[in-house]
Amino acid sequence: MDQVKKQILVVDDNQDIRKLVVQMLGIEDYDILTAINGDEALEIMKSHRFDLILLDIMMPGKSGMEVLTEIRSSKDSKIKDLLVVMLTAKSSMEDIEAALSAGATSYIIKPFRSKTIKQKIWNVFEAQKNEAEDE
């Protein structure tokens, strides 16, 4: 039985970061879409279903924290319950705690290594799978 590819949305205003993440994760078995800002990400989420979002915090327009808040307050359970991994240069404990308490699933600090991002995403999917099995 073929396994369905996980759908990932990469949201970052930096084109180089988007390209890098797509390259790093493209080798894995993921389908990846990108958005250049929070507004575009929210628009894409209306028409696509994702398993996970990699979300930058510091972006023009809506910040990643604002997007996270909109995701968690969504009436649509497919959006509300999304796995959201913050991918950001903001590295203070206050930033990390604020994101996690706002509903982020996990947190990756830039600059990051390919192994780190792959492992973090794998861990998040495994934790979700284990939770589903425990229900």
Image (tube, rainbow, N blue to C red):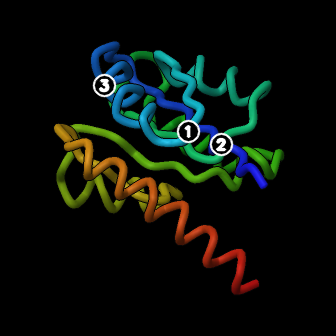
The residue that label 2 is drawn on is 5
The residue that label 3 is drawn on is 20
Figure check: 131 above or below 128? below
Identify the residue at horizontal 59%, vertical 25% (top origin): 41
- Res 50 quadrant in image: top right
The residue that label 1 is drawn on is 30
Q: For this view, does 50 lie left or right of residue 112?
A: right
The mark nearer the N terminus, 1 or 3, is: 3
Identify the residue at horizontal 64%, vertical 47% (top origin): 51
Q: For this view, does 127 lie left or right of residue 91?
A: right
Q: What residue type is labelled 1?
A: Tyr
Labels 1 and 3 touching (C-beta < 8 A): no
The mark nearer the N terminus, 1 or 2, is: 2
On-image quarter of the N terminus: bottom right
- Badge 2 marks a residue whose secondary structure is loop
Figure check: 68 above or below 21? below
- Badge 3 marks a residue whose secondary structure is helix
Labels 1 and 2 touching (C-beta < 8 A): yes
Q: Which of 47 and 66 is in front in this view?
A: 47
The answer for how far apart the CA atoms under marks 2 and 3 are is: 20 Å
Question: Which residue is at the far right?
Answer: 76
